[in-house]
Amino acid sequence: LRRALFELMEEKQAEAITVTDIANRANVNRGTFYLHYRDVPDMLEKLKDEMLGHFKNTASNIDPRDMIASAAKGEPYPVAVAIFEFAIANADFFKAIFGPNGDMSFVRELKAFMTGQLYNKLVDLQPPDDDLLIPRDYLVAYIASANVGIVMHWIETGMKLPAREMGQVMTQLMNYGPLASAKVKKK
């Protein structure tokens, strides 16, 4: 059923997909579908909740100090690698949800979660608000959007780089920023 939904999402908007479409594509009867889900929106919502839950379990282990230590050793941060490995294991979901007929509400939920995580984890490491170069909420919004954007770009371009290499990309960008990573300025 999952595979059928994701295949159909490559062809049309989720709102246009019917239970009959999914059942026919999965080569099962409609009753089989109804054993698991009320309707297509319920199916999609349950799948999004499941994926977001797994992502949250992994991403909640992010510790900026550990990421800095990994970057200093020139190694990918293990939690970043785990995030990309999770995406690989669930590539069908992520390709469908981030695709042209996907559900951008999932992206918003992902960014909201990352924003909360980053805010909570960085606030203890940063100086008081008056000593920051930019307002904290803009910094956190930038980091959350950039990290979700990296994952989306990687998925949209066919997940060509392995998880470990993507973990290294994310580790370097987070630690050194885009200008140093692009060698426009020194680390």
Image (cartoon, rainbow, N blue to C red):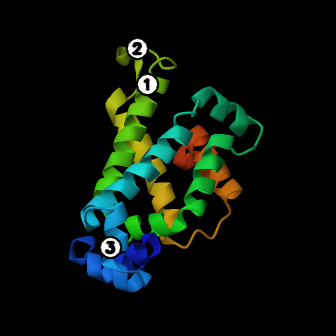
Q: Residues within 10 Å of mark 1 (few under 14, many from 20)?
A: few
Q: Residue at x 50, y 56 (%)?
A: 150
Identify the amino acid type marked 1: Asn
Spatial CA span between label 2 and label 1: 14 Å
Answer yes or no: is residue 8 visible.
yes
- What residue sits right under mark 1 in the picture? 120
* Mark earlier in primary sequence (3, 2): 3
Nearest-to-viewer mark from 3 and 2: 3
* Mark earlier in primary sequence (3, 1): 3
Task: Give percent across and percent down for residue 71.
Answer: 69, 39
Task: Give percent across and percent down for residue 124.
Answer: 48, 17
Nearest-to-viewer mark from 3 and 1: 3
Name the image quarter holding residue 134. top left
Task: Give percent across and percent down for residue 7.
Answer: 42, 79
Check the picture and name the quadrant holding the C terminus. Answer: top right
Which mark identifies residue 128?
2
Spatial CA span between label 3 and label 2: 58 Å
Identify the amino acid type marked 2: Pro
Residue furthest to the left: 15
Q: Residue at x 42, y 72 (%)?
A: 1
Check if mark 3's residue and mark 1's residue have beta carbons within 8 Å.
no
Q: Nearer the viewer, residue 19 or 168?
A: 19
Name the image quarter holding residue 139. top left
Helix or strand or loop: what does disc 2 sit on? loop
